[in-house]
Image (cartoon, rainbow, N blue to C red):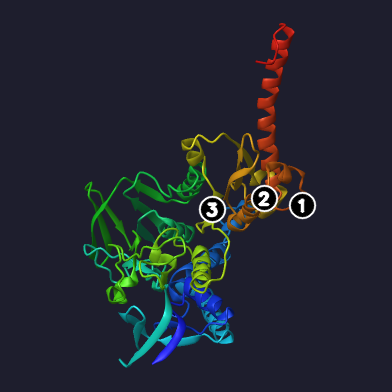
Amino acid sequence: MDQFDVVVIGSGPAGQKAAIAAAKLGKRAAIVERKHMMGGVCINTGTIPSKTLREAVLYLTGLNQRELYGDSYRLKSDITVTDLAARTDHVVSREIDVIQHQLARNSVTMFVGSASFVGPNEITVEDATGDLKRVRGDHFVIAVGTRPARPPSVDFDSETVVDSDQILGLSRVPSSMVVVGAGVIGIEYASMFAALGSKVTVIEKRPAMLDFCDREIVESLQYQLRDRGVTFRFGESVRTVERHPSGTLTILESGKVIPADTVLYSAGRQGVSDELNVEAAGLTADSRGRLKVDEHYRTEVGHIYAVGDVIGFPALAATSMEQGRRAAYHAFGEPVGVVDDDLQPIGIYAIPELSFVGRTEDQLTASNVPFEVGVARYRELARGAIMGDSYGLLKLLVHAEERTLLGVHAFGSNAAELVHIGQTVMGLGGTIDYLVDAVFNYPTLAEGYKVAALDAVNKMRAIERVRTRGLVGELDAGESPLP
């Protein structure tokens, strides 16, 4: 029986970083992963293929060039799934090679098969032939991720009715599509297929989409999607989805019937902890397969950690990587800095993309925090004109008294890259004055930070000017400014 200091179950972003972090500390580490799933869902069916698909869509449709060359501009008139898959397959293959090389370079042992707990310190690994291998560990890190939730009322067939893991396997670009669920995944795919020319209808039971994002940013995204023909049905629930030889019918609880070539059902994800027999280790998952952890990512069994999507929100590759590293460090007594949730960036790779760090206007208002808003619009930046992006914007939320940054919200080209400048300023406790005085390369989108900072400062100056004039008026009337 093999014995390790730490056994990591799952080779996605969280699992990779946990195993490599432990190996860097001189510990004997192992990773267990199913066959053909190296890199986890992130590499094979999630983040990497979906974001690569997005780049392929942008390139082949010429969407980002249409403001300069007209709405009819396209790099390729008849885009096929083969065209889209070529780029995706190349990137996925390359990323798998990178991961395998990193694990081998750090002497992380790889077990290929399905893991199952038989006790708190022992698992079995079943390979493709059915053979079992027993593996023991002083510590375990569960990083198995999630799978799409599949309600029994929906008949998935991987071609006309698909989940978010199956959509990359479509044989053709559908002329029409229904997307059930206006979460991050649903909106990303809805925007991609709308860009390809599909007539998309989004169904969401909540009254709005992406309610954790800044309202103005979400409204801007919604406007752009509607402009590309996307129809939104908020406050609606799906009763059933029917498959017919000529397509699908999505029947809503309200009685509406929506025809489409393809239905993407993207209404949540389910942790795959049920496949691990976690009960044998003394663990209990919730109804969605998620495991509860403390601030160090320890489960209720002290030597077993859980990280990544299987512990729930925010369920992003970037945060999962950091969770994996921190779990490994804590397991072996290595100090780490304090996590500030307000500094965790969120990126949503719709077309156009949006990203933010910090709090929203609604959150600040609810907390009675005085703030001012500074905005830079891409159409006011030379780089925006060069790129052909007139709709993008950068919004800064500034404390009205302390002048610190409370939130940064970006929408448009390179939003997910742009947000990190604000994240750094926030992390170092910088004020709006730093951005006012800083010199940014010209022409760049980053220059928007200076424009937005000046906008906020000018608004704050206008308030101070009114207060000063009021004070002068009191003095002229012979009143003392002192209480």
Mark 3 or mark 1: whose residue is earlier in sequence: 3
- Mark 1, mark 2: which one is toward the viewer? 1
85 lies above or below 379: below
Decide if residue 431 is in sight here.
yes
Query: CB atoms at circles 2 and 3 under 8 Å apart?
Result: no
Residue 30 pos. (x, y %): 47, 84
Q: Quadrant of the N terminus?
A: bottom left
Q: Residues within 10 Å of mark 2 (few under 14, many from 20)?
A: many
In the rendered structure, the answer to whether residue 442 lies left or right of residue 92 reads right
**Which residue position is annotated with label 2?**
384
Whole-angstrom CA distance, mark 1 to mark 2, is: 11 Å
Whole-angstrom CA distance, mark 3 to mark 1, is: 23 Å
Q: Quadrant of the C terminus?
A: top right
Q: Nearer the viewer, residue 343 or 444?
A: 343
Q: Secondary structure at mark 2?
A: helix
Query: CB atoms at circles 1 and 2 under 8 Å apart?
Result: no
Q: Nearer the viewer, residue 199 or 279?
A: 279
**Which residue position is annotated with label 3?**
354
Residue at point 48%, 45% (across, down) = 223
Residue 442 circle label: 1
Mark 1 or mark 2: whose residue is earlier in sequence: 2
